[in-house]
Image (cartoon, rainbow, N blue to C red):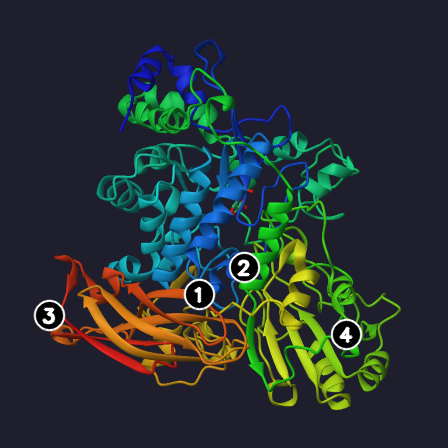
């Protein structure tokens, strides 16, 4: 799809001007993560790009939303659409045109440092959230950039590792989320740093051009990840349209603030790390670890692309295609020959509605993993609030997704505002510091040893005197590094054990990027997972713990001991000799645990409500829809997530199929005693399998659809014959 305006501009642009539109440049205002200057004489405006998945990251504050995993734990794509629209509005208010998100890589490796930026281990769940967020963002006139295309499932050696993965597995697991995001109207896609089957993604013609553009009809821009362009001719001919950031690391840091300027470190999302503020060279002292790309490749398209076009190594028609794609997106959102006002969306940041949405996502994404009845808390309970970081909101993990909020509530503030009984506070453990892209290379034991006021004895004393002890614990995760272990950092497990020994009504609330180990599970009264809850940490925690909100979340990833995941084999993660073998094939996440009959700690889809539900009368409405009646049998309102899994007939030639695959889901809020009939649309891909010759193929026979509130609790079966 292209317009007359775009074609006219293309014929008016000189070669040099066209090349200028294929790479980033220094942002003169220093507000954006990426910047492409326009062409003033032709009224092509400058384009500003901002991270990211959890909120808008510029030099000014914005709403800091919960982790993407919290959003997907809601199992409610409508909430995700509202989130996308809100993110778009915040981007507009900050004068940004392109959002660098959503992140939608599959959670293949539970240790991955960026899991908090991603949705799920399941492709259908990932695709539904990706599509809803993209649709929401694009509806405001802002371009969405699903990332990182594709198979960027680990941070260790992310700039070089080759994902060795066969086509069927790519098609069934790793590509569908991107396909859904493209179908939902994404105007850009970011290529990933890693290689796939030996070829860098920035020059992967088969995936960028043949699959994404030709087969899926993607007419938007393929942009590189920052410093993730490996060559000029190879990437241009492979399908890369825009090289980012288009400048050197040195120029990038300078544009973010002069060396030594405080804002510099802040905007880079770190404190006192690189770049070296005392030096004239802002990149000096920067330790480029293997999770980081080569920073010298930033400006490749600047000089060399024009030469390659003139030498005939890159056809001019390809250069036109690169520019056409960018102009088409600007045209689509009314940005050519006009300005932002031409769109009918209004920008706004940090409105009461946005704050409310941030809190709603946090509560809807909170998962009650275990509860022996201690929750919800009585209003007048005397509560001990314990934990290394109880006086701060956990906003997110480290790296490009960091957002600075206008306002935040800590767990202590949230509980104090809600409690009618007494509240005592004892950290019990040295603060567990945030880690960032820059200091990830020197991981510590997770604890700030200098913190004076943190003794286990104080925590135990507070717990002994209280009716209930709430222990808030956390992990550390960042872009550019993977978590070394799924155990909680420092001595937090010991803290939990000590508090649980002092008070048998101990509740653990974990703020983590993904699965964590629970060696104390049998010793505590309740376990809550609330990811990185963002700016409303304290108020959302209080709302769920006191039962003002039902814990709406269900697990979008399986929780298990780390050795139980298929990626416990080092050939698969982090890989050997530069290659990560994906030979677990389709058996990722719950597919693996189901196929091997292994018992997860908490299965995919699991999460408790304060209410109870009965599922009955399941039937097939047609060959891709099932219906079921759900009744809230409790005397309080609550939420259940209806999940439908498809078990397809055996494929010919003994081709492996996972025992069952998520086909569809719906999150239902029901009042006490209320029942409702709900229809679930099943994704065609849950019935099918990808055949290299024939494409998506549905085997004929009985497809058994089992329905229930978790992947391991499916009381009803319906058979669909295909
Ligand atoms: C990340 C991207 C991000 C980009 C710009 C890279 O390090 O991988 O997700 O959008 O930086 O900040």
Q: Crowding near pointer 2: few (<14 within 10 Å), some, many (20+)?
A: many
Q: State which mark lies toward you, 4 or 2.
A: 4
Front position in the image: 596 or 480: 596
Q: State which mark lies toward you, 3 or 2.
A: 3
Per the image, label 2 sits on a secondary structure element best described as helix
**Which numbered disc flags the more N-terminal residue, 2 or 1?**
2
Q: Are marks 4 and 3 in contact (CB under 8 Å)?
A: no
Front position in the image: 167 or 98: 98
Which labelled disc corresponds to residue 700? 3
Residue designated by label 4: 386
Per the image, label 1 sits on a secondary structure element best described as loop
Which labelled disc corresponds to residue 621? none
Whole-Å distance between the Cαs marked 4 and 2? 24 Å
Q: Please give the name of the residue rendered at 33% of the width and 44% of the height, measured from the top-left corner.
A: 182
Residue 673 x/y as whole percent = 46, 76
Residue 555 in view, yes or no: yes
Residue 229 x/y as whole percent = 44, 39
């Amino acid at each position: 799809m292209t317009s007359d305006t775009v074609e006219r501009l293309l014929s008016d642009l000189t070669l040099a001007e066209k090349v200028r539109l294929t790479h980033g440049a220094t942002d003169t205002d220093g507000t954006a993560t990426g910047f492409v200057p326009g062409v003033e004489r032709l009224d092509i405006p400058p384009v500003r790009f901002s991270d990211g998945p959890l909120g808008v990251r510029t030099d000014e504050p914005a709403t800091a939303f919960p982790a993407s995993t919290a959003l997907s734990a809601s199992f409610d794509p409508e909430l995700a659409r509202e989130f996308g629209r809100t993110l778009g509005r915040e981007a507009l208010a900050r004068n940004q045109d392109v959002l660098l998100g959503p992140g939608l890589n599959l959670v293949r490796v539970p240790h991955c440092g960026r899991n908090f930026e991603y949705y799920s281990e399941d492709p259908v769940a990932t695709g539904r959230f990706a599509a809803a967020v993209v649709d929401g963002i694009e509806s405001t006139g802002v371009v969405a950039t699903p990332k990182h295309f594709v198979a960027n499932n680990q941070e260790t050696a992310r700039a070089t590792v080759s994902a060795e993965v066969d086509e069927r597995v790519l098609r069934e697991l790793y590509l569908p989320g991107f396909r859904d995001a493209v179908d939902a109207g994404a105007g850009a896609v970011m290529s990933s740093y890693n290689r796939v089957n030996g070829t860098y993604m920035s020059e992967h013609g088969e995936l960028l051009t043949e699959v994404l553009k030709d087969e899926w009809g993607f007419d938007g821009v393929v942009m590189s990840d920052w410093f993730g362009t490996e060559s000029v001719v190879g990437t241009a001919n492979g399908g890369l349209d825009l090289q980012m950031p288009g400048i050197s690391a040195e120029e990038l840091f300078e544009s973010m603030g002069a060396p030594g300027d405080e804002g510099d470190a802040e905007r880079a999302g770190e404190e006192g790390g690189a770049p070296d503020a005392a030096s004239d060279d802002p990149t000096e002292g920067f330790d480029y670890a293997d999770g980081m790309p080569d920073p010298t490749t930033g400006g490749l398209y600047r000089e060399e692309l024009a030469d390659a076009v003139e030498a005939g190594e890159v056809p001019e028609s390809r250069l036109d295609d690169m520019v056409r794609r960018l102009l088409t997106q600007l045209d689509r959102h009314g940005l050519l020959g006009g300005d932002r006002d031409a769109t009918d969306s209004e920008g706004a940041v940090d409105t009461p509605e946005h704050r409310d949405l941030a809190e709603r996502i946090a509560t809807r994404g909170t998962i009650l993993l275990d509860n022996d009845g201690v929750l919800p808390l009585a209003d007048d309970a005397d509560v001990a609030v314990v934990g290394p970081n109880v006086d701060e909101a956990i906003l997110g993990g480290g790296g490009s997704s960091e957002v600075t909020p206008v306002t935040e509530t800590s767990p202590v503030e949230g509980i104090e505002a809600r409690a009618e009984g007494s509240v005592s506070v004892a950290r019990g453990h040295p603060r567990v510091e945030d880690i960032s892209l820059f200091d990830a290379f020197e991981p510590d034991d997770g604890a700030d040893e200098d913190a004076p006021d943190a003794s286990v004895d104080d925590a135990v004393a507070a717990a002994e005197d209280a009716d209930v002890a709430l222990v808030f614990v956390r992990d550390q995760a960042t872009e550019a590094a993977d978590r070394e272990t799924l155990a909680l950092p420092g001595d937090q497990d010991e803290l939990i054990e000590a508090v649980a020994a002092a008070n048998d009504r101990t509740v653990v609330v974990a703020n983590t990027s993904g699965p964590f180990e629970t060696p104390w599970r049998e010793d505590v009264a309740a376990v809550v997972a609330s990811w990185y809850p963002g700016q409303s940490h304290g108020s959302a925690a209080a709302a769920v713990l006191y039962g003002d909100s039902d814990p709406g979340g269900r697990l979008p990833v399986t929780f298990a001991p780390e050795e139980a995941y298929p990626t416990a084999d080092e050939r698969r993660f982090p890989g050997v000799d530069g290659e990560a073998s994906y030979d677990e094939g389709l058996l990722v996440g719950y597919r693996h645990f189901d196929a091997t009959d292994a018992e997860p700690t908490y299965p995919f889809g699991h999460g408790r409500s304060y209410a109870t539900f009965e599922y009955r009368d399941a039937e097939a409405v047609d060959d891709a829809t099932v219906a079921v009646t759900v009744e809230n049998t409790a005397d309080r309102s609550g939420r259940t997530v209806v999940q439908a899994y498809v078990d397809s007939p055996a494929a010919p030639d003994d081709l492996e199929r996972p025992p069952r695959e998520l086909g569809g889901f719906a999150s239902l809020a029901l009042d006490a005693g209320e029942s409702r009939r709900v229809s679930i649309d099943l994704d065609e891909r849950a019935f099918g399998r990808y055949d290299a010759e024939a494409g998506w193929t549905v085997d004929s026979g009985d497809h058994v659809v089992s329905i229930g509130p978790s992947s391991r609790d499916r009381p009803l079966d319906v058979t669909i014959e295909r």
